Image (cartoon, rainbow, N blue to C red):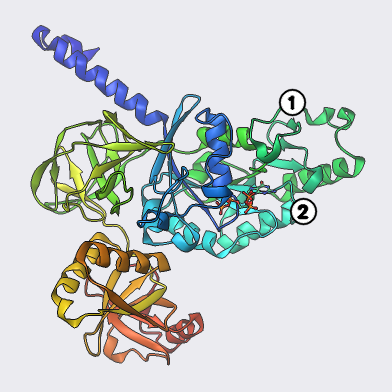
Amino acid sequence: MAVVVCCRSDYPLIHMETTLQHVLAAATAQRRTFAIISHPDAGKTTLTEKLLLYSGLIRTAGMVRGRKGGKVTASDWMGMEQERGISITASAMQFPYKDAVINLLDTPGHQDFSEDTYRTLTAADSAIMVIDAAKGVEAQTRKLFTVCRMRKIPVLTLINKMDLPGRQPLDLMTEVEQALDIQASAVNWPIGSGSDFVGIVNREDGHVRLFGRTAPGGASKVTVSELMLAELGASGRVSQDTLMQLEHDLELLEIAGNQFARERFLQGLVTPVFFASALTNFGIESFLDAFVDLAPAPGSRLADLETGGEISVDPIEAPFSAYVFKLQANMNPKHRDSTAFLRICSGRFERDMVVKHHRLDREIRLSRPHSMVAQERSRIEEAFPGDIIGIINPGIFSIGDTISVSGGFNFKPLPQFQPEIFARVRPSDVGKRKTFDKGMAQMAQEGTVQIMRSLNDGDQLVAAVGRLQFDVLQYRLRHEYRVETILDPLPYTCSAWLEGDPATFKAPSASMLVKDQRDRVVVLFGDTLMKTIGRDRNPEHILRDMG
Ligand code: G4P
């Protein structure tokens, strides 16, 4: 090797560096960092649990749920008693599967839907979109998919709950294509549906997997018998009708379906589709195998050089770098502290390493890092590109901050997400105004809510993508600043950033012009119809959906 011959006395050092470089390259190639995007109830929690079951991290499914089988939500960390399951405040879980190391990012949904959900997606290299076979593409899935598209994150589709009566698989494929404007390519196809869902066939090689009975809730792995498609009729497991339907569907797909090419998937042009039942474990193992094969390992990330221009930060060639994608305060009563979650973009992380904090222009020591494995916060000694680490935050981190060994650049700023709920907030006790203002400034900096100001009177209002953000704001103002607040909701449900002169903008009724934290003009609308009217009436202006 060229490096070894340059100078004898350098040998041990260079040899060590080469070895470290190999370790880094191998660890990076193993990483699969992804998030699950879905509408509430589509089966995200169940799938998460089954991924852990098949990875061997848990032996019996049934732990992810909280009290009495009820779902635990991220709002539980807000001072309520906790008996938490896995997916709650664990911003990311890491588990091994075969040769891969998988990082699953938590994307809270439902009443916990917030800007954090969106920001978390920026830390993912791929996403799994879970769709309920009976419901098709739903609202929250659509919103999250839009963020994936914007970030060019490749998406795999899992059509879940095939064990229940649902829509026709071909209809579901069409709906994915039309609702999300992406090509869908079926990797496998279901054999039967509802109570007759007995297996899946791999379209490429005709390999069939027939599933045995599972324990209630699919607590343990399902037994599988493998055969070829040509042998299915003789297996005695499927009716003549099911066989005919299957042959018909496969033929149609052959003629009219989209070809799958990994390159096109990585570019976000096509989504591979899989059919499964997370509850009964049917199709989960082969999905996980395909996911590990198809999903990308961490790649380069673009950054702005402090001296101007851009660089692409290579995960292996560049020394350690990372950025903050999420901040969380007082998440666990056992650890009363605030945590900054960082996504490692390049190089090897070691505990106690000293790095540059680019925005503050100072050096900091990264002590007490932790990762999440199952329910436990565990101390980590080292981590690699794609990994998520939690660092105790003594108020020095903001969303989007870059840290690195070399310094001199900043990863592209995180986009500002389009708020959908708005309110005015004020202290109940006017005497606490100063403390209130201080708290609000801090919350805005941490990205808890967005603060906007009316263009008319400069009045302050708060904006968010989910109600939880307002709850967190009020909770933190009460507990950290001792300020009780009154929140008056405003009647706007959508917004857009305005490009063009606000003075000549013909605002539709029930709308309001405000400025965001970066002094850009935003229009708030009463509903989407008003937004459409706003667009139609102002052809000279542009209304942009993501800031
Ligand atoms: P979420 O995290 O996306 O919100 O969904 P979650 O996994 O909690 O699933 C929502 C409901 O759908 C749960 O039922 C779950 O058991 C069920 N489910 C998930 N995947 C499948 C599947 O493949 N087949 C069937 N038949 N059901 C599925 P629940 O009644 O709300 O909760 P539980 O009482 O079953 O725990």
Q: Secondary structure at mark 2?
A: loop
Most foreground residue, 157 or 349:
349
Q: Is mark 2 within 8 Å of ligand 1?
A: no
Left or right of 263: which side holds 237? Answer: right
Most foreground residue, 4 or 316:
316
Q: Residue 340 at what x, y percent from top left?
A: 26, 48
Q: Is residue 387 visible?
A: no
Q: Is mark 1 within 8 Å of ligand 1?
A: no
Q: For mark 2, does the 10 Å Cα neighbourhood hold few (<14), some (14 to 19), or many (20 or more) residues?
A: some
User: Would you name the residue on which mark 1 appears?
Assistant: 226
User: Would you name the residue on which mark 2 appears?
Assistant: 165
Left or right of 191: which side holds 176? Answer: left
Most foreground residue, 277 or 301:
277
Badge nearest the viewer, 1 or 2: 2
Quadrant showing the N terminus: top left
Quadrant showing the C terminus: bottom left
Q: Is residue 498 above or below residue 156?
A: below
Q: Is residue 481 above or below residue 173?
A: below
- Which amino acid type is marked by label 2? Pro
Left or right of 180: which side holds 530? Answer: left
Q: Residue 189 at what x, y percent from top left?
A: 72, 42
Separation of residues labelled 1 and 2 (CA atoms): 25 Å
Q: Residue 542 at what x, y percent from top left?
A: 37, 78
- Which amino acid type is marked by label 1? Glu
